[in-house]
Structures are given as structure tokens and as C-alpha cells.
Image (cartoon, rainbow, N blue to C red):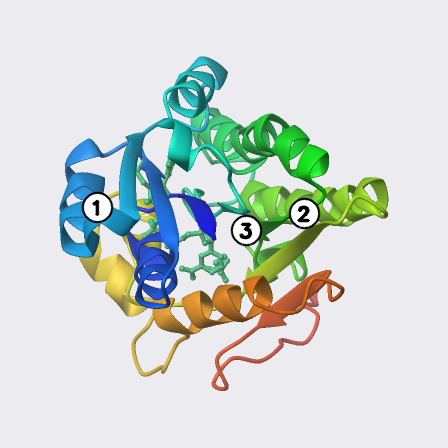
Amino acid sequence: MIVLITGASAGFGAEMARTFVSNGHRVILAARRTDRIADLAAELGDAALPVTLDVTSRPSIEAALAGLPADWKQIDVLINNAGLALNTVPAHEVPLEDWETMIATNCKGLVTMTRLVLPDMVARGSGLVINIGSTAGHYPYPGGNVYGATKAFVEQFTLNLRADLVGTGVRATNLAPGLSGGTEFSNVRFKGDDSAAAKVYEGTTPLSAKDIADTAYWIATLPPHVNVNSIELMPTCQGFSPFTIKRA
Ligand code: NDP
Ligand code: 8X3
């Protein structure tokens, strides 16, 4: 299989690349940080192709796809993993730019990648799109405002993709993890405040990038007649909160 992974320069994406390559597949490593994906490609050898792109820019994606060598053009699996959360402050305080960046990346970037890769899959009658959602798209929490909304979008877009793709042989999955450590997610969210980022995982055994990579690999290697529509994972230490009630 040829697997195109967005956000392959760190976290889940880099680990998914390692997992697919170690199982004999080829990966296209897509991200903005050229040095990072070049280093990972050097680690993975001929089975990896680094491709610099910014998912928020349609011309950047189009140029990257057009520039793929002929023997890398048939993408069997697209993993829309690039994404981010910015900030945990309430809706009435958060910089509007943070919301714009999350929507541009998590929603617009993901649909643009999908729209540009999908026609070839449909023409071939096979393919798989794995979209990385989140528990934040299923359950609200304070400060989750637009991040959670973007991941709810990912869930519904994936289900609507399924509705359109029935009968084409192309599959689509929303993979929604909960608390996951060992990635740059919280460092990005807290804008480089690494001690605030580390506190998120204190005293927990969160999901790891390997847990997510193994799940993506399992989804991608199921028989072609099996479609996982949506799958949610949490670490065992994570649970649910009661409703907040503000009493006078
Ligand atoms: P990381 O911050 O470690 O990785 C995010 C990746 O996204 C990086 O490789 C980054 O690459 C890439 N990226 C960000 N913006 C763009 C862009 N505009 N164009 C291309 N690539 C981009 O985070 P995780 O690995 O933890 O997160 C991966 C996905 O999983 C995200 O969608 C996140 O929302 C989701 N998720 C994470 C959870 C967690 O707790 N960690 C839980 C549930 C879901 P670069 O900067 O080089 O472009
Ligand atoms: C990441 C999980 O709970 O930090 O999507 O939003 S959470």
C-alpha cells in the first residue's frame, strides 16, 4: 500500500509512518517542517517519501500531489492527521486568529486533501480515508470551544463521505482518540509553555502515538468489505464528568 500521512513530522503521524513502513508499506510524509520529514525519511529509507505541504493552502497541496513521482501517485490510504488545538481559554477571550487557524487546518485542510485525493480512489474502486477526529468532537469541555467543533465536523464529514462512497469500494473512518501523550499536541496548544503542556499528562497513563498508529494500521488492513465508520479510544484512566451546575 501507499499511505499518504499529513502531519507526519511529529506525534501520531510520524509513528503511523513507522508502523506502515515496518509492515512493508510505503508512506508519503506530508507536513510543513521539511527538516523533520527529511530526517524521518532518512530513518525509514526508500519506503518513505517526504513532501513539504501546508494543508491550509490549496495551491500547496495541489503542487505537492502534482509533483509526486509516477510510482508514488497511486495513493491507497489517505490519513488526514494534520491538526491542532490552540488555547484553552473561554470563547469570549480567545484570539480570533486561533479559531481561524484551527478551522483552516482541521476542517478546510482536511476536506481539501480529501477532495483532491478521492477521485483517483473512486476511479480505481478502492481506497481508504482515515480522518483523525477526537473525543473533543464528541464531548464538550471548557476551553474546547472551536477545537471540539472542528473535530465534530471531522466526524460528520466522515460519515457523509461514507454516504457518498457506498458502492464505490472506497472506505472512510473517523478515528477519535482521547487523552494522548508523547506528541507535540499540548506544546502547540499552550504555545511553547512546555510545563503547562506536561501538566496535562501528570499522573496519567495516556494513549500513546503507537496506540493510535496500531489502530490506524488495523483499520487499513481489515478486509475490503469491512468499513469502520467511527472508532473512539480513551486511556483507561480517562472518564466522564457530570454536568456543571452553577448554583447561586
Ligand atoms: P502533533 O502536534 O505532535 O502533530 C501535529 C502534526 O500536524 C505535525 O506533524 C504538524 O506538522 C502537522 N500540521 C499542523 N498544521 C499543519 C499544516 N497547516 N499543514 C501540514 N501539517 C500541519 O500532534 P498529535 O500527533 O498529537 O496530533 C495529530 C492529530 O491528532 C491532530 O489532528 C490532533 O488534533 C489529533 N488528536 C490528538 C490528540 C492528542 O491528545 N494528542 C487526541 C485526539 C486527537 P508541521 O508543523 O511540520 O506542519
Ligand atoms: C485531543 C484530546 O481532550 O485534549 O483531541 O481535546 S483533548
Label 1: which secondary element: loop
| Label of residue 126 in the image | 2
> Is the CB of the residue bearing disc 1 within 8 angstroms of ligand 1?
no
Q: Residue furthest front?
A: 71
Residue 221 versus residue 29 in the image, above or below: below
Residue displayed at 58% across by 52% down: 130
How far apart marks 3 and 2 lie (CA) works out to 36 Å
Dot 3, how many residues are within 10 Å of its Cα: few (below 14), some (14-19), or many (20+)? Answer: many
Q: Which mark is first along the chain, 2 or 1?
A: 2
Q: Amino acid at mark 1?
A: Gly
Task: State the image coordinates of residue 126 (x, y, percent, origin top left).
Answer: 67, 47
User: Looking at the image, is 231 positioned above or below residue 110?
Assistant: below
Please, what is the three-letter code of the amino acid marked with disc 3? Gly
Confirm or deny contact between disc 3 and disc 2 (CB under 8 A).
Answer: no
**Residue that appears at 37% across and 43% down:** 7
Q: Looking at numbered disc 2 in the image, what kind of residue is underneath it?
A: Ser
Depth check: give the residue in front, 195 or 167: 167
Residue linked to disc 1: 192
Query: Does the image show residue 70?
Result: yes
Q: Of the residues under marks 3 and 1, which one precedes in the sequence?
A: 3
Whether residue 246 is visible to the viewer of this picture, yes or no, is: no
Look at mark 3 in the image and give the residue it sits on.
144
> On the rendered structure, is 198 left or right of 204?
left
Quadrant of res 197: bottom left
